[in-house]
Amino acid sequence: MQFMRHLMSPLDLSVGELNDILDLACDIEANPKAYAHKCDGLKLATLFYEPSTRTRLSFEAAMMNLGGNVLGFSSAASSSASKGESVSDTIRMVSCYADICAMRHPKEGAPLVASMKSSIPVINAGDGGHQHPTQTLTDLMTIRSLKGRLDNLTIGLCGDLKFGRTVHSLIHAMIRYPNVRFILISPEELRIPSYIREDVLQKNNIPFEEVVRLEEALPKLDLLYMTRVQRERFFNEEDYVRMKDFYILDKKKMALAGPDMLVLHPLPRVNEISVEVDDDPRAVYFKQVQYGVYVRMALILTLLKWRDTTC
Amino acid sequence: MQFMRHLMSPLDLSVGELNDILDLACDIEANPKAYAHKCDGLKLATLFYEPSTRTRLSFEAAMMNLGGNVLGFSSAASSSASKGESVSDTIRMVSCYADICAMRHPKEGAPLVASMKSSIPVINAGDGGHQHPTQTLTDLMTIRSLKGRLDNLTIGLCGDLKFGRTVHSLIHAMIRYPNVRFILISPEELRIPSYIREDVLQKNNIPFEEVVRLEEALPKLDLLYMTRVQRERFFNEEDYVRMKDFYILDKKKMALAGPDMLVLHPLPRVNEISVEVDDDPRAVYFKQVQYGVYVRMALILTLLKWRDTTC
Amino acid sequence: MQFMRHLMSPLDLSVGELNDILDLACDIEANPKAYAHKCDGLKLATLFYEPSTRTRLSFEAAMMNLGGNVLGFSSAASSSASKGESVSDTIRMVSCYADICAMRHPKEGAPLVASMKSSIPVINAGDGGHQHPTQTLTDLMTIRSLKGRLDNLTIGLCGDLKFGRTVHSLIHAMIRYPNVRFILISPEELRIPSYIREDVLQKNNIPFEEVVRLEEALPKLDLLYMTRVQRERFFNEEDYVRMKDFYILDKKKMALAGPDMLVLHPLPRVNEISVEVDDDPRAVYFKQVQYGVYVRMALILTLLKWRDTTC
């Protein structure tokens, strides 16, 4: 017996449920044709109150790969939000138009508010600096597929650790697997927030160290998770310009890493990974994009299955 | 023998034709799967020169539910209107791309101008303060489905009766049924225009009264049609702020109404209906949204059938 | 043996390849149902970094007519370009989402840069003032279908010959056929650039003359290709206003032309062709739109076939 469920945070899924979704995503990767009509006649609504081409197109490709249709909007300007409608009312409307919904919103918690009035499953496709669970599912699938495991890993997280929600989500998700350790690589100004350092890492006895030099961390890593220093997270342009180039991964730095260290990145990248690294077989950030489609297909199928088995 | 027809106003349809469309919509509601492939291989163009998520998504969901595809644009900014093209030329282009078209335009009469050069059926999806016929079809289907009739009704119209085109259209549509009376509830500044009071209501001997207090009207009503006080219809912000809260429907006011009085609203609502009313079984404004999809499906099928039987 | 190919310029196709595409487009026109499922399960990405309703909808209609799906964006504002992503990275992402891509970009060469990193065929859907190959394919199909040939033609090109990329592309494309001559009709300020006059026309011994009066040219023409004087190509508003009305085609001027002279226009037109000309059987600019869909269908099928036969 299952109830209709939404996905607000990666932690909404138990380790077992997550495993099932990743298994399903792997089966989709192996047999895409077997899934090409699973969502025939069904519709996904993509409600993007702020633009995010990557995430939106990934959801749309996922639904289309399943045989389903897509409708929605790609920015608040072309939505009725400008007429003062609440997300609660919008989702009730959209519940009449679609079978499942992916919502991106600049305000933290907006998808959660929507889910409370929704009669269709709502997937949080990013809410401000808060959560972006399908990015985390993508990261987990990439790691599991290419390293063969989610445990026993030394993970370097590099760049904007203060504002980078993908990094925060990944930490939350990875500490549920045994023997994972982190090396946190950032300038002083962009260190991991204390509520993660203390309440998540220290409290759970997760080994970690904080370093300021990427070179220092590289030889020890199984994974390097690079992040963009996002212009929009800074209060002023000067701070951004001063800090953005501190942590650029290039060929020279890659030479310091082991032969099996994978480089992930949530994309888009600006210049924090030099394009000369793209052809390195350890650079898997473009493969991540493809895994993102498979895992979203698996997620859509799973949430629709749970909805249909509601008692 | 039929000619290809467009829908500019609800009154373009005779009472009999309208009845057929509502009957078809009811059959669609009862047997959606029987209609799931009626528009396979056909395309709807949604030409929205001003954003309207609700109406656009309703049309898109309707066409997709029929197995068809959708293309178009959701705001003038992403159209070639910015290059100075006339709607007459745009519709001739679109006639090569799609089989039927829904057009929203800020200028009154623009869809009519388009329809004169179109080789595909054009549906007016709202033209300025003028007409919005599919909203009216939605309202009629909601009333007929939930009250069981379109005649013998006392209808309260509340809010912005001066600028609210949905209210004007509904009056025009309802006076074609026997024994309908209206109670017009608005502030002095937003009273129904004299051309409707005199040329429509008085001229046709339709009983009506005008009141300023919602409380006064509530006990007498079979239906209460609430409307938003639209910010964009006001000349200045002060007038809007002063008037918008005059006519807010809440639980206390609902207690004054009869047990069968239905509350409709074209949506989006801002605060003219308190959210505490949403769970009242008499509040049917979210059901209206669902009826809007069915009636648009019926309309698309009907206009395409008329086109195909053109001699 | 074929390799996956992109389409950046009409000249990327040999005369023989182009002929095959036009033959295929004609067969599609004659038997559209035979092609209605050729792209079932495939996806076209429309990446429009600047709005162009006409071109975008033509591609979308083409892909839908083939049974395929469409995803993408219609302006840079709703893309991740605003986050500083390069087109090279964007196309690698999109390669995971779609099977073929049409890219419009304000910068010359952007689609070429994208194609170098793409694992799916890229079609240049217009790059600044540079190329717009599918417009040229459309023009060629229109001419071949309605004149029955691409050789032995006297072609008048009228309007903005300086900035008009459709005119430049058409000249490049037409000089590959025997016995084609041009009459170039423009104000002094908008004459054809010298690199076309000298390096293309004179160098290849193509007969041409330059005239300033449309009336003078009309009696000699097999085809008149009218172009819009595009506001956005001018440095200031005054120049635009002064020049835009010089070359307006009306009924009176049409009386000077022969009974078989066809009038083409890439559209949108503003006022350079009077609407009174629209009903003249020689005015074929709206037929061009329909040919544009067929030829894009043929192009999509051809590029996908080449991709699939890659060795």
Image: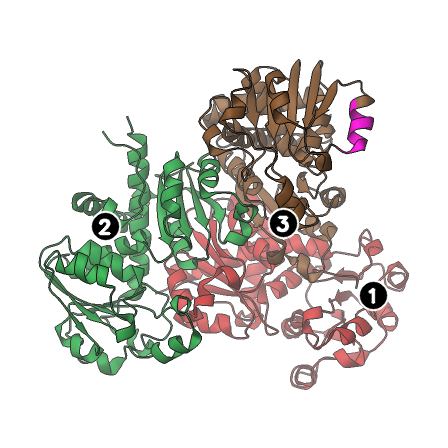
Chain colours: A brown, B red, C green
Q: Residue at x 75, y 66 (%)?
A: B226
Q: Secondary structure at mark 1?
A: loop
Q: Residues within 10 Å of mark 2 (few under 14, many from 20)?
A: some
**Residue designated by label 1:** B248
Residue B2 visible in the shown view: no
**Residue designated by label 3:** A50
Marks 1 and 2, how far apart in space?
Answer: 62 Å
Residue C84 vs A187, above or below: the answer is below
Instruction: From the image, state whether disc 2 or disc 3 is nearer to you.
Output: 3
Of B49 and A291, nearer the camera is: A291
Q: Residues within 10 Å of mark 1 (few under 14, many from 20)?
A: some
| Residue C217 image label | none
Marks 1 and 3, how far apart in space?
Answer: 31 Å
Residue B285 vs A43, above or below: the answer is below
Marks 2 and 3, how far apart in space?
Answer: 43 Å
Q: Residue C244: x and y, percent?
A: 35, 76
Q: Residue C29: x and y, percent?
A: 27, 51
**Residue designated by label 2:** C26
Q: Quadrant of residue C168?
A: bottom left
What is the chain identity of the residue bearing mark 2? C
Q: For the magenta stretch, what is the residue range?
A: A193-201
Which residue type carries mark 2? Cys
Q: Secondary structure at mark 2?
A: helix
What is the chain identity of the residue bearing mark 1? B
Of C249 and B127, nearer the camera is: C249
Same-subunit check for callouts 1 and 2:
no
Which residue type carries mark 3? Glu
Q: Quadrant of residue B295?
A: bottom right
Q: Residue at x 73, y 27 (%)?
A: A172
Q: Quadrant of residue B56?
A: bottom right
- Image quarter of the C terminus of chain B: bottom left
Q: Residue B27: x and y, percent?
A: 58, 51
